[in-house]
Amino acid sequence: MTTILSNLDLLKRVPLFSPLTAEQADAIADVVDKRHFKRGEILVRQHHRSDELFILLAGRVRLVSSHKSGRQMVLNKLRSGEILDEMSLIDDLPHSATALAEIPTDVLTLSRSDFMRCMQDNSHIAHAVMSRLVQRLRQADRKIESLALMDVHGRVGRALVEHAAPSDGGAMVIHEKISRQDIAKMVGASREMVSRVMKDLEARGFIQTNSPSRMTLRESLVRSLA
């Protein structure tokens, strides 16, 4: 039997809203809407404006920046519990990237006026949003540093580490399929170059491909990029 969760139940699962009192959470639950995006469907477009905050409940969203030459760079991937578009809602400027669903994705949406009121009324929310913006800024700094100072081996290694989660024994694991083309768009290199680098990393024991959707990064790789 399928259980239909209320907006309030769904909000309670999102870290951003966990500090709210029951009354505060009820007020937000009354003004959010549920939406579903199919694989490949666009949530927001680069250079366009929107008036909604997206709260990811399930699925995965890719952020892609496109140049007029046709080249693309993958900036980030967002997963359940994360939020999308708070920057555009705060400064009221167009999106700096296109966000599209990598897999079927469920979200809650909150209008700009309700989002701003939520931050004004709840210091916990405002602090959490600021912390998230700082985290993204630091991530952007690391990407700029790697593009400027690292060779392709280093850039590929850092991209893999950023997509991995810690596991037992000091290793880190990527629990999703990540293509050579995706990595190439993250690090500003050709797919062919990335394929050569990945083969070299595997031959040297830095990474191990366990299955199409699971890759283990050895502690030696993580240490070398610290």
Image (tube, rainbow, N blue to C red):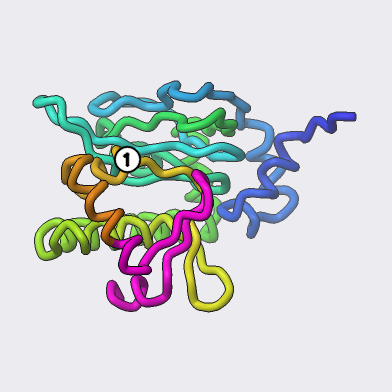
Q: Is residue 211 magenta?
A: yes
Which residue lies at the image location 56% right of the left edge and 31% below the top edge? 105
The answer to whether one can see residue 128 in this image is no
Rendered view: 21 above or below 117: below
Rendered view: 93 above or below 35: below
Which of these two is toward me, 179 or 226?
Answer: 179
Q: Residue 181, image x and y in percent?
A: 29, 38
Q: Quadrant of residue 225?
A: bottom left
Rendered view: 8 above or below 225: above
SS at circle 1 = helix
- Residue situated furthest front in the rendering: 203
* 183 relative position to 111: left or right: left
Give the extent of the magenta segment: 201-226
Q: Residue 201, image x and y in percent?
A: 30, 62
The answer to whether one can see residue 155 in this image is yes
How many neighbours does mark 1 have within 10 angstroms: few (below 14), some (14-19), or many (20 or more)?
Answer: some
Which residue lies at the image location 41% right of the left edge and 44% below the top edge? 178
Q: Which residue is mark 1?
A: 182
* 35 relative position to 93: left or right: right
In the rendered image, the quadrant that contains the C terminus is: bottom left
Which of these two is toward me, 167 or 214?
Answer: 214
Which residue lies at the image location 47% right of the left edge and 43% below the top edge? 177
Q: Quadrant of residue 35?
A: top right
Q: Residue 166, image x and y in percent?
A: 51, 68
The amino acid on which the numbered mark 1 sits, given as a three-letter code, is: Asp
Q: Residue 187, image x and y in percent?
A: 22, 49
